[in-house]
Amino acid sequence: MIITTTPTIEGRPITQYLGIVMGETILGANIVRDFMASITDIVGGRSAAYEKSLREAREIAMKELEAEAASRGADAVVGVDVDYETIGQGSMLMVSVSGTAVRLG
């Protein structure tokens, strides 16, 4: 399945719009504590442990988006947007991905 942030796919006309699809995931309530505990991983202002958690959350959300699009019979998802949001008292991080499921010609 093609997943893109662009509104179209070059050389592949969109023949049908199947609606908005989404995927969401929330990093556990201990993310702040885990981040602080992994402070020793920081090199040059980056935390490998925190980046790994964000990457995993994004991948889960993308897989959910793709599964929802596939269940609608889509060939692609266009206009994909990835958002990160803290919830609770900043102790949890939500990753949400949305786009438009389409069939291509």
Image (spheres, helix red, strand yellow):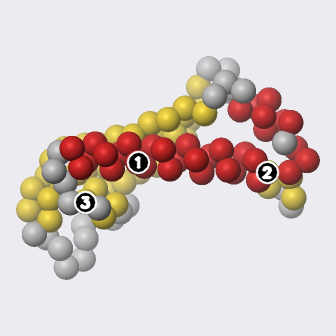
Callout in the foreground (3, 1): 1
Q: Gap between marks 3 and 2, in whole Å?
A: 33 Å
Q: Earlier in the sequence, mark 2 or mark 1?
A: 2
Circle 3 residue:
76
Q: Quadrant of the C terminus?
A: bottom left
Indicate the quadrant where residue 92 lies: top right
Residue at figure coordinates x 58%, y 47% from the top left? 56
Q: Which mark is residue 63?
A: 1
> Foreground: 7 or 43?
43
Identity, as a three-letter code, of the amino acid under mark 3: Ala
Neighbour tally class for label 1: few under 14, some 14-19, many 20 plus, Cα within 10 Å: some
Say whether residue 103 is left or right of residue 82: left
Mark number, residue 47: 2
Of badges 2 and 1, the one in the foreground is: 1
Q: Looking at numbered disc 2 in the image, what kind of residue is underneath it?
A: Ser
Residue drawn 14% across the image and 65% down it: 104
Circles 2 and 1 in contact, beta carbons < 8 Å: no
